[in-house]
Amino acid sequence: MKISIVGTGYVGIVTGACFAEKGHHVMCVDIDQSKVDLINKGTAPIYERGLDDLLKKHAGDRLRATTDLTDAVQQTDLSMIAVGTPFDGNEIDLTYIKNVAKQLGQALKAKRGYHVVVVKSTVVPGTTDEVVLPILEESSGKKAGVDFGVGMNPEFLTEGEAVNEFMYPDRIVLGGIDQPTIERQAELYQGFPDVEVLRTNNKTAEMIKYAANSLLATCISFSNEMANLCAAIKDVDVVDVMHGVHVSRYLTVPLPGKQRAQPPVVSFLSAGCGFGGSCFPKDVKALAAHGQKHHVPMDLLNAVLSINERQPQQIIKILKRQFPSLQGVRVAILGLSFRPDTNDMRESPAIPIIKGLVREGAVLKGYDPIAMDDARKLFDSNELEFCESLAAALSDVDAVVLVTRWDEFKRVPELLKGKDPQPLFVDGRRLIEKQQMARYAGIGF
Ligand SMILES: NC(=O)c1ccc[n+]([C@@H]2O[C@H](COP(=O)([O-])OP(=O)(O)OC[C@H]3O[C@@H](n4cnc5c(N)ncnc54)[C@H](O)[C@@H]3O)[C@@H](O)[C@H]2O)c1
């Protein structure tokens, strides 16, 4: 099939590259010429495992990038909208979506034949039918359901695992105003035979995405609230408590030999210094605001958000137990991205932790295996000394704070071994076993 994808951010470029791998012809559209140039050269504009290989393989052949949206619509049968949907402080900001819908509508004016427009961005229920569809009709002068279809296909990929998750999805949700819209999308996804495909209306498709993200964010805030209580009670470690919770038959499946299958939800039911990223915080905020707009009290999601906003401060609290004044205390921050295997720093808990420690007068070094260039855009060198290696970050510090669960940080016990004096190790993700460290502190005990 010939498709165009508008927006080549994390979702757009991964979607484009993966559909090209599945044999489709893809035109990626972005207003950012530098991204377009990189893609056409076969280079990924973001760090995502496996993406560079796909771009090298398909760029210039089945995958092309352009800034010309009209041409992309002319040359394709289906267009996906994959632009950002930030939270503006009060509600979801649909500026980018509306702009693209208008441009797509104008391009549809001259388009011969039936075309399908699919919203892939995460948008609050009602957006596709009540915002995007009317803009498309108005700017094209054509009729939805007659001249073009309007669908909604939410994306569930996780940054850092995006290519693999896109190629092997757990579900495909296809929303649409009518059967032809849904069937055209089903054709696009024919190359994914072993997966459940949910065919539904646009509002349900939109709501599924928010419900899924809200549930996982709730699991995280639940675990963090338990952790903070365990820490206050003393002699209770949240890791032991949550292990006792995980072995419930409702959460894990017992296997022969006292083993248990660890379902991935367990990683969300674990304590840490809070969730971040470009999705959970803004999506939970947008859904809570949307609920309020519909006069539905959203107490649970509001609590999830406030627990999460406070959680990075737990790190500072733990440090202050050992260093009542943080003035001049030298602290290494390990991990700057919001999760491992990505360079994405959007809403990373590292940001409030670093800002809070700077306010307290701590002297900071930072290291991240991938996100250093992105971090340089957020912090200046007075706030954070940027280290080239994990070993460099660990030298001459009073304390080490682990913020992101990068695998590389499992080497910290070995690298700190024999150092005298030993820095205090504050585990913001409970990645390291406490017995491995001379001076260990962490969230939740
Ligand atoms: N990042 C994720 O992990 C993830 C996962 C699932 C869903 N989503 C959702 O997908 C959507 C996109 O997220 P993202 O992280 O890929 O965003 P992003 O900010 O990384 O990328 C958006 C891209 O759209 C481009 N753009 C903006 N206006 C445009 C226009 N008029 N024409 C063409 N291009 C334009 C920007 O230049 C940018 O490259 C959001 O709604 C997000 O909530 C994101």
Image (cartoon, rainbow, N blue to C red):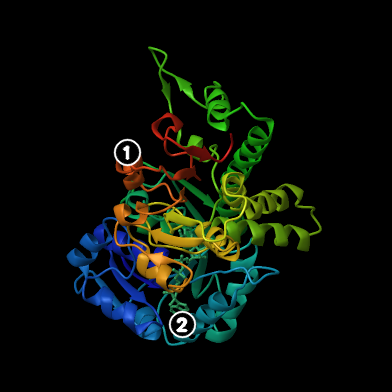
- The answer to whether the beta carbon of the residue marked 2 is less than 8 Å from any atom of ligand 1 is no
* Three-letter amino acid code of the residue under disc 1: Lys
Name the residue carrying label 1.
417
Q: Is residue 128 left or right of residue 399?
A: right
Residue 79 visible, this angle:
no
* Three-letter amino acid code of the residue under disc 2: Leu
Q: Residue at x 40, y 69 (%)?
A: 374
Counting from the top left corner in percent of width and height, residue 393 is at 36, 56
Asked whether 100 or 55 is in front, the reply is 55
Q: Is residue 14 above or below residue 322?
A: below
Q: Secondary structure at mark 2?
A: helix
Instruction: Give me the disc on residue 108.
Output: 2
Q: Is residue 25 above or below residue 432?
A: below
Task: Assign the C terminus to one quadrant of the image.
Answer: top right
Counting from the top left corner in percent of width and height, residue 59 is at 21, 71
Q: Secondary structure at mark 1?
A: loop
Question: CB of mark 2 within 8 Å of CB of mark 1?
Answer: no
